[in-house]
Image (cartoon, coloured by chain):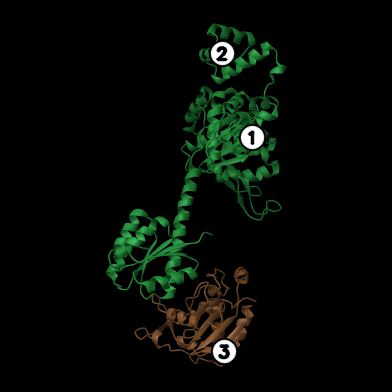
Chain colours: A brown, B green
Amino acid sequence: MGPPVFVAFLNGYAPPWAHLVIDGLGASLPHPIHRIDLTFDLRPYYAPDRRQHHATLLLATLLRHLPEPGAKIVGVTAEDLFIPVLTFVFGLSQLEGSAAVISTHRLRNEFYGLPADEHLLRTRTVKEIVHELGHAFGLVHCRDQRCVMRASTYVEEVDLKDAGFCDACRTMMESRP
Amino acid sequence: MNQRRILIVDDELSVRKSLEEWFREDGFQVETAEDGEAALKKLPAGPFDIMVIDLKMPGMDGMTLQKRVREVDRDATIIILTAYASVETAVEALKQGAFDYLTKPVDPDDLSHVVQNALRQKELTEENLRLKEKVSELNLPTPIIGQSPKMQHVMDMLRTVAETDSTVVILGESGTGKELIARAIHAQSRRRYFPIVAVNCGSIPETLLESELFGHEKGAFTGAQYRRKGKIELAHGGTLFLDEIGDISAKMQIDLLRVLETKRFNRLGGDTDVSSDFRLVCATNKDLEKLVEEKSFREDLYYRINVFTIQLPPLRERTGDILPLAKHFVEKYARAMAKPILEFSSEAEAVLLAYRWPGNVRELENAVERAMVIGKGPTIQAADLPLAMNGDLVDPKDLSLEALEKEHIGRVLAQHDGNVTQSAQALGIDRATLYHKIKRYGLRR
């Protein structure tokens, strides 16, 4: 089964489809998936000049909220995230670590001036959570076009890949403690 | 696949950490340095596939660092990072050989594209170098090893005939290197910038040989789905080398004679005249004159092709070339097998010199290749050579003292290419005695 995965919706971000995301993760990951809600002060991570939140600092805070040793925690926020050298990130993870965080901010169709699409947002969210968790389990980017570990630097690339691992990445996931 | 390596040089810890995480997730092995001095110290731990260098750093700036890196690694792939974007700095960075530059904060898509493009260019550059090397290897003429007077005579004839456009017949036993001579003639001829097209007439059934030489039109026979050019057509401008010409059928002899007389022919199943301007070089291990006498080779074709003849001596008649050839093949297979160049033990050299080499140079090459495969080094021993086991060496038990003397004198003469003075010295007898024995045993010098 592997270590439990805690999906933490942050600071009251509780979309009505959150439970469907948990179900969707179950299809891609063999691990026990638990939903938790976490609230903490995000203001220290906010960069007013960029109007974004610092993903690395947020990740460090999530580590302090790890429900049990050996577990993995992935935070889900609606805030736009960045790391210092990049204009934005869809998500961030500790490679072979315990924590990851993803943002739905740029996964929404509305961000690109398109009509809202809840189903698409939910699907993208699942893919990003699985992708970042893959890094937390030690996987690096995959060249397989359909694999969830394929790197995505714009949202259409997220849509092009599947929510599941290719055979090679699945084998590596299953071999991880 | 080897893990790709990247060196990130930036004075800001958060930038170094962010990029380190980004590239590690992308499968890179990442090294970081906080300034130019630290980066230069990391260079010996390279090579790095890519270096990402911040332009503005305390102490040595990115431009200076790039210059210093190039002194060590001229082909380094460098991407410049700058928070101070301006056309001037960008142009300067590119002038100094940077692959590209990116302005902080970087759009992830831009970073991804620049890195992918840099890697692709690096791969193409490396592949280009490999291919150039390969092509230069292919273009290197295979050397003809032969210092013996007989081979020097062959080389003289080769040079003489190469300049002309005459048809050449190369005669010699199997494995003496007839194709090598044909290619050398082509390489030294005015036709060298055009192809040499080789056809082994003896290895192709007659029905296929016709199509192979003349080509065919679509539908000429079952399976002829497309028009196909024949070897004669492909040799246009260059040289057509017909190996084992003595083996072609009577019908093919007529067809070939017609082509040689008119330089025109029809493809199989076609009625359109096709012309081809080629120089013909033929080879055979058969006695063409005898075949003519036996009426199995057309006399008119024989006189048509027999303009200039080069007779290649068998290896046993140029024993002075055996060891240089063997050493050449050792070097060749050492390169191919990535092995050290081995020397022959004195016993192995004696075995090589004593053997009769019925398969000539080809057999010698095969023997050396085998010895290189099974030899444990540091020298090639007699036991590594197949001939030591195959019993082709003359067993002294089978010879009388007189026969043994004849055999020995014959071998020494061959080793010295018939030079009586040198042979007499080697045998420890005077020249008059050697002349006497040559006459007595009916030996050829």
Q: Which residue is mark 2?
A: B427
Q: Position of residue B384 (x, y in %)?
A: 63, 33
Q: Position of residue B221 (x, y in %)?
A: 70, 51
Q: Residues at marks 2 and 3, common chain? A: no
Q: Secondary structure at mark 3?
A: helix
Q: Position of residue B251 (x, y in %)?
A: 69, 37
Q: Residues at marks 2 and 1, common chain? A: yes
In the displayed structure, would residue B395 be above or below residue A10? above
Callout 2 touching callout 3 (CB < 8 Å): no
Side (left or right) of B106 relative to B228: left
Residue B167 visible in rendering: no
Corner quadrant of residue B400: top right
Disc 2 versus disc 1: nearer the observer: 2
Residue nearest the viewer, comparing B27 with B274: B27
- Outermost residue on the front side: it is A69
In the displayed structure, would residue A13 be above or below residue B218? below
Q: Residue at x 49, y 80 (%)?
A: A63
Residue nearest the viewer, comparing B72 with B265: B72
Corner quadrant of residue B257: top right
CA neighbours of label 3 inside 10 A, class few (<14), some (14 to 19), many (20+): some
CA neighbours of label 1 inside 10 A, class few (<14), some (14 to 19), many (20+): many
